[in-house]
Image (tube, grey):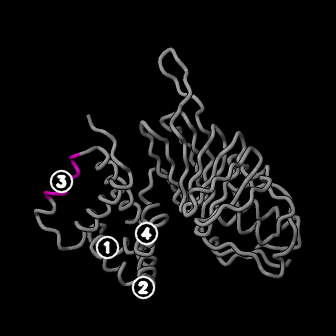
């Protein structure tokens, strides 16, 4: 029987093999050793398939984009990825060089178990019966074994509905395995609940919709903050801020809407920009306009048109990928 291996360890091994084989210095002995590793466990094969998928995607990156990004990348990353570009064909994989920088975004995001691109959403039913919904630009790893259920949110935003019970033939019993969400800033323990988690480079925000969670900052694991339904908290690696009332509309992205109440226009535009490819900004002259309403995140053009009709602003477009709201 093949027992599940630690996801993080397998991923590190796969990354090391990929870099080794594409270094330009790989020998026949290296390739034979890789074949042995690849065939030794199904988890190795699954991890390798992510590289194959990533390679196929990056081959479609326009050459001029790849070239300009490569010039901006750090030289040590260029050296590491020079061989990988050979395997991918042409120079398109050079685009990846700037994404390898950190363990949380970058290459880790490309290799995550589940991921979404800009403007995409995805719902996943986990092996324990829990439901996971990924919002735009999100990547998540899932590790479920006999002792725990762990989601690792590398970037983006998720909505989690935990399975309070799971079925055994003829018996329904409570699932005693802890359900946790880990981000670069700490860990969240779900207490049979429904909640959202949003993480970026600076911090993580967790908002509880049902039941409760416990939050620990990674550098202060002994300090536990409990959040009950209707509460939210922001935390960094060093601390968990004081809990605050959660915005009841915070999870409306699940239904395709951005619902705001007395937001600055600049903040509304910044949020819509998460769901749109290219550059979307707000002119400082209109940034402070207060906005309330509901806007579709699945059609940002329509959302901008609604704002332009309701407020003294207009949409200025150089191209579809370079848009700003300016004074009317």
Q: Which residue is mark 3?
A: 35
Residue at 80% from the left image edge and 78% from the top image edge: 326
Picture disc at residue 178: none
Spatial CA distance of label 1 from label 4 is 10 Å
Label 2: which secondary element: helix
Quadrant in the picture for residue 277: bottom right
Mark 1 and mark 2 lie on one chain; the one further toward the N terminus is 2
Indicate the position of residue 2 as horizontal and vertical percent values: 27, 38
> On the rendered image, what quadrant is the N terminus found in?
top left
- Residue toward you, 174 or 239: 239
Mark 1 and mark 4 lie on one chain; the one further toward the N terminus is 4
Dominant secondary structure, magenta: helix
Indicate the position of residue 133 as horizontal and vertical percent values: 59, 46
Region in magenta: 32-40
Q: Which residue is mark 1?
A: 90
Spatial CA distance of label 3 from label 1 is 25 Å
In the displayed structure, 157 sits above or below 85; it is above
Q: Residues within 10 Å of mark 4 (few under 14, many from 20)?
A: some
Q: Residues within 10 Å of mark 3 (few under 14, many from 20)?
A: few
Q: Which residue is mark 2?
A: 71
> On the rendered image, what quadrant is the C terminus found in?
bottom right
Quadrant in the picture for residue 131: top right
Q: Which residue is mark 4?
A: 61
Spatial CA distance of label 3 from label 2 is 34 Å
Indicate the position of residue 52 as horizontal and vertical percent values: 33, 57
Q: Is residue 188 left or right of residue 96?
A: right
Number of marks drawn: 4
């Amino acid at each position: 029987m093949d027992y599940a291996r630690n996801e993080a360890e397998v991923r590190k091994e796969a990354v090391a093999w990929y870099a080794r084989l594409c270094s330009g210095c790989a020998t026949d002995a290296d390739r034979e050793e890789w074949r042995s590793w690849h065939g030794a466990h199904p988890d190795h094969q699954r991890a390798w398939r992510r590289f194959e998928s990533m390679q196929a995607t990056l081959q479609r990156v326009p050459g001029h984009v790849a070239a300009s990004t490569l010039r901006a990348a750090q030289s040590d990353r260029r050296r590491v990825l020079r061989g990988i570009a050979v395997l991918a064909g042409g120079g398109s994989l050079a685009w990846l060089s700037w994404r390898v920088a950190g363990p949380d975004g970058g290459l880790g995001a490309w290799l995550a178990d589940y991921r979404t691109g800009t403007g995409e959403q995805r719902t996943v039913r986990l092996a324990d019966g829990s439901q996971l919904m990924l919002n735009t630009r999100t990547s998540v790893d899932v590790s479920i074994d006999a002792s725990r259920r762990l989601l690792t949110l590398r970037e983006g935003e998720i909505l989690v509905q935990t399975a309070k019970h799971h079925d055994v033939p003829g018996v329904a019993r409570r699932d005693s395995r802890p359900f946790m969400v880990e981000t670069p800033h700490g860990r969240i323990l779900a207490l049979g609940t429904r909640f959202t988690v949003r993480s970026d480079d600076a911090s993580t925000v967790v908002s509880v919709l049902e039941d409760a969670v416990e939050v620990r900052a990674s550098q202060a694991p002994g300090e536990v903050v409990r959040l009950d339904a209707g509460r939210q908290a922001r935390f960094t690696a060093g601390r968990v801020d004081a809990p605050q009332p959660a915005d009841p509309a915070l999870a409306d992205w699940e239904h395709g809407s951005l619902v705001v109440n007395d937001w600055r226009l600049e903040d509304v535009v910044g949020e819509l920009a998460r769901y749109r490819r290219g550059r979307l900004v707000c002119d400082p002259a209109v940034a402070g306009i207060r906005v309330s309403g509901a806007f579709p995140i699945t059609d940002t053009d329509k959302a901008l048109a609604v704002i332009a009709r309701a407020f003294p602003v207009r949409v200025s477009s150089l191209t579809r990928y370079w848009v700003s709201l300016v004074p009317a």
